Image (cartoon, rainbow, N blue to C red):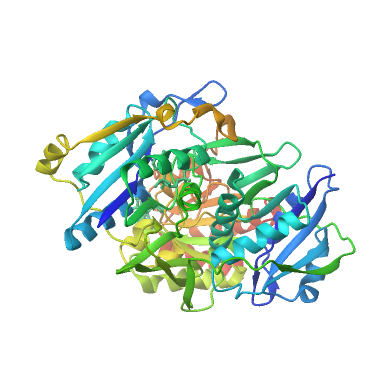
Amino acid sequence: MKICVCIKHVPDTAASIKLTGENGFEDSECKFVVNPYDEYGLEEAVSLVEKNGGEVVVLTVGKEAATATMRSAMAMGAHRAIHVKTGGQFLDSALTSRALKAAIDKDGAFDLIFTGKGSVDTEGFQTQYRLAAALGLPVVNEVSRLTVDGTKAVVERETGSGEREVLEMPLPGIIGATKGLNEPRYPKFPDIMKAKKKPIDVISISDLGIDEASGKSTLVKLESVPERSGAKMLQGSVKDQVTELVRILKEEEKVI
Amino acid sequence: MAKTGVFIEIGDGRVKETNFGVLTAARGASGNNEVYAFIMNADGNAVKDDLSAYGASKVITITSSGDIGASPDVQAAAIGAAAKEYGVDALLGLFSATGRDMFARVAAMMDEPMVSDCIAVDIDGKSGVKSHFSGKTFATIKLDCNVMLATIRPNAIEPAQAPVDAEVISYSAPPGDAGKVKVIEVKKGGAEKLDLTEAPVIITGGRAIKASENYRMLEECAAVIGAAVGASRAAVDAGYAPHSMQVGQTGKTVSPKLYIACGVSGAVQHFAGMKTSKVIVGINTDKDAPIFAKCDYGIVGDIFEVVPALTEALK
Ligand SMILES: Cc1cc2nc3c(=O)[nH]c(=O)nc-3n(C[C@H](O)[C@H](O)[C@H](O)COP(=O)(O)OP(=O)(O)OC[C@H]3O[C@@H](n4cnc5c(N)ncnc54)[C@H](O)[C@@H]3O)c2cc1C
Ligand SMILES: Nc1ncnc2c1ncn2[C@@H]1O[C@H](COP(=O)(O)O)[C@@H](O)[C@H]1O
């Protein structure tokens, strides 16, 4: 099987984000990682290929610095990488999906394409659907169980209050992975060393005929979410504290 | 005056409460937008009064010659066709498991930009405000579009009634292809519990809960005030609760009026899922737990003492 995994280079979820200007952030100051949901897709791809043979190709549309993230993905078992290089971190998801499609077309058809359920920086929840429409492939997102059976896949997704939907899709297709699908492996030292020698094919986004500035969604403002200034701590015995809390919630906050 | 469509989610024949905030947003800043409520697989007359109370003057029941419930692709095509048929300027829905999947399909099909999980929308200005970076920042995103597509975080917008007269219109979507993705089974959850994203109050148990049977203590408290019970990732990973109860970055994003975190340390990724709650209460044995720096009211104490006392006080 030839499997593609779309991986986004994103700031670690624990990193603090220092804003610059109206709509930027200081990306040289935070640690970047493989988007955590994309890791579930990557793990699934690697274990499928371990079982059935084939190759896993990671694909990233991102800045120069994304190289390190792609090396981490290869340390987890991907065989090679394609890096579509951009100037900025915030790329419209329609443009991203066009770039992903162009890179996929250039490399030749895949049997299966994985993405994450969403990215943890822009939280767009849509790139995989746009890529599917562009490639004319079926897509299911938030997949936490997958069975591949020849030319079709059976997938499961959670839909609310514990309800689960089982869906069938023909392959090739796109699967947006989420927690529950597997436990992504931690690469060992020799894997990290091996990953340094794996090939990365670098393509500039403009060589794919895409103008980075032509997106239809624009980030006009980025602002810190005001943090609560610290809790009002209740005092006294447990009984006093809960009585006071209930009074506040009823009379002052009016939330119960 | 814009014409706004809202995709309404219906459960057990009733309009889910969280739709009313979306209808409120659809009326726009002026409050004068003409609101079209799109419903699928449901009886328009049965839900008309609920929808018109929040300003929907047209209730469009969408049917299709194919089996509309069998494929999310067919549903998305039908909604897209209805949006076009009635010439809406914007189409809004919920950022729920159903809504976010549907809207992403519609956006890809229509090749229109979209903002997901908005906490505010400006229909005239074609922009939405949403979380970026796991709830650490809010981003304002402006769309260059023909039809503005946006999903709204459940409970993020306070519903306000605005009764109008409404008519029910049935719309039959043109037959398209059968859809590539097919639903073959729906597995019901255990008990018919209140969905976390729908709940006005949530009581969450973190790792400190120590065992799945101890969630009963939280359920007893929740029952008194009509709350739902949630869990942290540490509690889910330890096997105390199912993933469907997880709140946070990898779990559900919730925005209730009241969020009570019991034995939860207050990690960034947990806050990413509940930060926009109106009031947050933390209960923790450790007075230096990070949660106290980021919540509204704190009780330093053992959840096994505080929660039963709270249940009593609420009765
Ligand atoms: C990519 C990524 C995604 C993540 N997604 C999520 C997510 O969706 N949701 C999520 O919750 N986490 C998520 N996490 C994990 C998160 O970082 C924390 O590890 C997790 O939230 C901790 O859970 P906790 O607060 O229950 O446990 P702990 O951090 O172990 O905290 C337990 C707390 O309970 C207190 N305590 C102990 N005993 C008692 C008692 N008897 N009474 C009162 N207090 C007591 C302790 O003082 C402590 O503060 C994610 C992490 C990553 C890296
Ligand atoms: N720049 C990118 N490069 C590679 N994959 C991406 C990129 N942006 C998004 N994706 C993929 O699309 C999924 C959804 O992203 P988003 O629409 O940003 O939430 C992610 O989990 C990735 O798998």
B86 over A22 or under it: above or below: below
Q: Taking B194 as reference, is A141 left or right? A: left
Which residue is painted at 80% across and 59% down in the image?
B54
B171 over A37 or under it: above or below: below
Q: Taking B19 as reference, is A232 left or right? A: left
Which residue is painted at 32% across and 34% down in the image?
A83
Q: Taking B46 as reference, is A202 left or right? A: left
Q: Quadrant of the N terminus of chain A?
A: bottom left
Q: Nearer the viewer, residue A111 or B239?
A: A111
- Report if residue B266 is visible in the image: no
Q: How many marks?
A: 0
The residue most toward the top is A21
The residue most toward the left is A190
Q: Nearer the viewer, residue B192 or B70?
A: B70
The image quadrant in which ligand 2 is located: top left
- Report if residue B178 is visible in the image: yes
Which residue is painted at 26% across and 39% down in the image?
A81
x and y percentages locating residue B225 in the rendered image: 61, 68
A133 over A103 or under it: above or below: below
Q: Quadrant of the C terminus of chain A?
A: bottom right
Q: Nearer the viewer, residue A71 or B204?
A: A71
x and y percentages locating residue B303 in the rendered image: 42, 61
x and y percentages locating residue A37 in the rendered image: 37, 50
x and y percentages locating residue B278 in the rendered image: 62, 49
Q: Taking B40 as reference, is A227 left or right? A: left
